[in-house]
Amino acid sequence: MTEKLSENELIQQRRSKLEEMRNKGIAYPNSFRRDSLSADLQQECEGLSKEELEEKSIEVSIAGRIMLQRIMGKASFMTLQDMKGQIQAYIRSNDLPEGQYADFKTWDLGDIVGIRGKLFITKTGELTVHADSIEMLTKSLRPLPEKHLGLVDTEQRYRKRYLDLITNPESLEVFKKRSQIISSIRDFFTKHEYLEVETPMMHSVLGGAAAKPFTTHHNALDMDLYLRIAPELYLKRLVVGGLERVFEINRNFRNEGLSTKHNPEFTMLEYYSAYADFNDQMNFIEKLFNDLTAEVFGSSVIEHNGQSLDFSKPFTRVTLKEAVSQKLSVDSSLLEDRSFLLETTKKLKIDNVDNLSDGKLLFELFEELVEGNLIEPTFITGYPKDVSPLSRSSDNNPLEVDRFELFIGGKEIANGFSELNDPEDQAERFHEQVNQKSAGDEEAMEFDADYVEALEYGLPPCAGVGIGIDRLVMLLTGAQSIRDVLLFPQMKPKG
């Protein structure tokens, strides 16, 4: 029985093979050009008989990583993996230039190779390239994870995403779907005459959302800057400037903890439309989700944690007060009683509530009791004004704003509202945010005088929405952690 070599011994063996290649002057060539990909060939030859394929005499050049080898004397098989899948190659000594078969027998799993040859179908019915020339393109110096196991350690999958993508087809499929989702969103907004824009990543004034920022320093200007927590105030400046429909898909940065739902940098879609309100945006989101799922997944009904979610139907709409009162089984009028709100939050062991406003107390109850149970697509409306500093006040209730949040699968997916375009009201709310920051609220906004000045030139009636792309991809692919949909999630350094 052959003794199993350690990883270090295997690496040393591979380095010795590379050294031989260097001595021959054939290490890391870049002259091979492929003309075919695995899945395209499978599709092109689907339904052809052995005889029909042989008659076509199709010559191809393929390249990829060796994932499987079956070396048998003077004839062998190997499986190559490229960007679209896998395809088998048949390697026979008599069909190759002198010395190539001997070289082939020294190749390892993980090596990247090029093969030229003719397509045929084996006795078992598998499409295969019968090689007439083979070439080593990149020597892999480290062995891949054990065959058939893939990279199963979750932390290693995140830290070494490249190995995860090589060995776990399911992970690769998630990131392909992510790309398709973003592409479909872009197409949807372009079709509806939105202009894609880019706004600054470094802000001199903190604003656009309630969050703790990352701070950096610009040496030439000798000033501190914030990595943006949201693009909102810049996008609305563009609406003031006459770009009446704008959207941006880009990164935001928030100095918060790591969890299955949070990463300090994340991708957001944010968009604004003049002459629209929050009701228009709810209708628009319903259409976006219906079209998106149908295009990317072929159906507007998707499975999520064993439950079917139908995006072709109107989403549920309920006010925040209604949702909390239903959960507590009390009349909604009780939620206007501060003593009841304080008593209930303390019973639920929610900390530091004595100095919170009534609206914030109600919001705390919603987050604690309701949010995680909203599985079907649900718009929550009727948000308190004091947790919505950039939203337009409701015409029906001055303590509430024209705002919604969309929840699906127990997670917040979108946040939108009719925009506050009254510069005096906005200045007053910024002052309140400054007071909260002075009182110790690290997530409160600063006073953005330039933004107030922009509003004084006139922001048309307007509504905007932010959608978390990462959470959306989690929802649509069934991923259980945000790290499963980020190619390189933030990780604590290995100690």
Image (cartoon, helix red, strand yellow):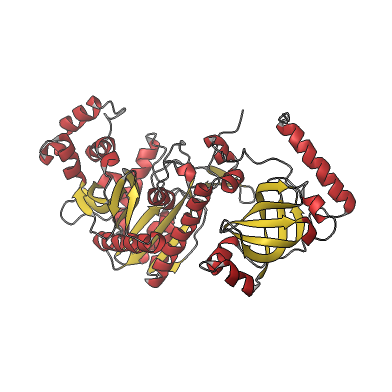
- Is 22 or 390 nearer to us in this picture? 22
Residue 87 in sight in this render = yes
Residue 328 position, x and y percent, is 16, 34
Residue 34 in sight in this render = no
In the picture as drawn, the residue positioned furthest to the right comes out as 23
- Is 243 or 220 nearer to us in this picture? 243
Tell me the residue at 52%/36% (across/down).
154
Residue 287 position, x and y percent, is 30, 63
Tell me the residue at 33%/67% (across/down).
274
- Quarter of the image containing the N terminus? top right
**Relative to residue 354, is residue 43 drawn left or right?**
right
Tell me the residue at 39%/64% (across/down).
295
Above or below for 387 versus 36? above
Residue 117 position, x and y percent, is 70, 65
Above or below for 190 versus 384? below
Q: Quadrant of residue 337?
A: top left
**Relative to residue 266, is residue 333 drawn left or right?**
left
Residue 467 position, x and y percent, is 38, 54
